[in-house]
Image: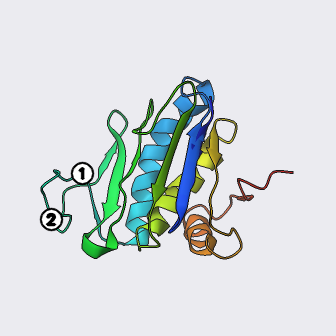
Amino acid sequence: MKLRFPSLSYCIPGTLQDMQSDEWQSAWPPLVQDAGLVIHYANIPLTGPTEPDQAITERTPVILDEKNGIFLNGVGDDGYEDFYIRKIGNSFSSGKKNFSFCKTGRRPYDLVVCTILLRAYVLAPSTFELSSDGDWGNDWVEARDLYHCIWPEENIPCPWEKE
């Protein structure tokens, strides 16, 4: 089972092909830790989970936890759909494939979501499938730039244009 995630102001779908795979299991702890680096370097106001009746302007802590996953959104009008990924299962899982997506509406937190998804793909390329309705050469430039600021030695091929 492969994890796929698309992203961007448009839609970022992802699918985790095999959540039990050694590759995903070993990628998960560094992904959670690295998501903290992405958030730090992006320097974009974020919030964690909010109650259904709670205004998204009321910031709560972002979740970055190996057990509870990675959960974040933009704040106020800069928020859109929650980004939530866990080690095992996501909120949109169905059947054997764990498919999930996050629409960011091109809000500022899109940068964080896309960069975390790129990191997941680099850490688990056989398991994490990433696609996007965004253009790699234009819409993903900021996320790729941030990625290279944090991990300058790593090459990131376009995840959805495989040869």
Q: Is residue 62 left or right of residue 113?
A: left
Q: Is residue 7 visible?
A: no
Q: Is residue 76 left or right of residue 95?
A: left
Of residues 24 and 108, the one drawn nearer to the viewer in this rendering: 108
Q: Is 119 rendered above or below residue 23?
A: below
Q: Is 108 rendered above or below residue 17?
A: below
Provide the secondary structure element on which disc 1 rests.
Answer: loop
Residue 22, position in %: x, y?
A: 60, 25
Crowd band around label 2 with a 10 angstrom C-alpha radius: few (<14), some (14–19), many (20+): few
Picture quadrant of residue 127: top right
Q: Is 91 rendered above or below residue 51?
A: above
Mark seen at residue 58: 2
Q: Residue furthest right?
A: 163
Residue 57, position in %: x, y?
A: 18, 69
Residue 107, position in %: x, y?
A: 41, 73
Label 1 – label 2 distance at C-alpha: 10 Å
Q: Residue at x 24, y 51 (%)?
A: 49
Amino acid identity at mark 1: Pro
Residue 68, position in %: x, y?
A: 32, 36
Marks 1 and 2 close (CB-CB < 8 Å): no
Query: Where does label 1 land, which residue?
Result: 49
Q: Residue at x 44, y 39 (%)?
A: 92
Crowd band around label 1 with a 10 angstrom C-alpha radius: few (<14), some (14–19), many (20+): some
Amino acid identity at mark 2: Glu
Mark seen at residue 68: none
Q: Residue at x 36, y 72 (%)?
A: 44
Q: Earlier in the sequence, mark 1 or mark 2?
A: 1
Q: Residue at x 39, y 55 (%)?
A: 36
Q: Quadrant of the N terminus?
A: top right
Q: Is residue 59 left or right of residue 74?
A: left
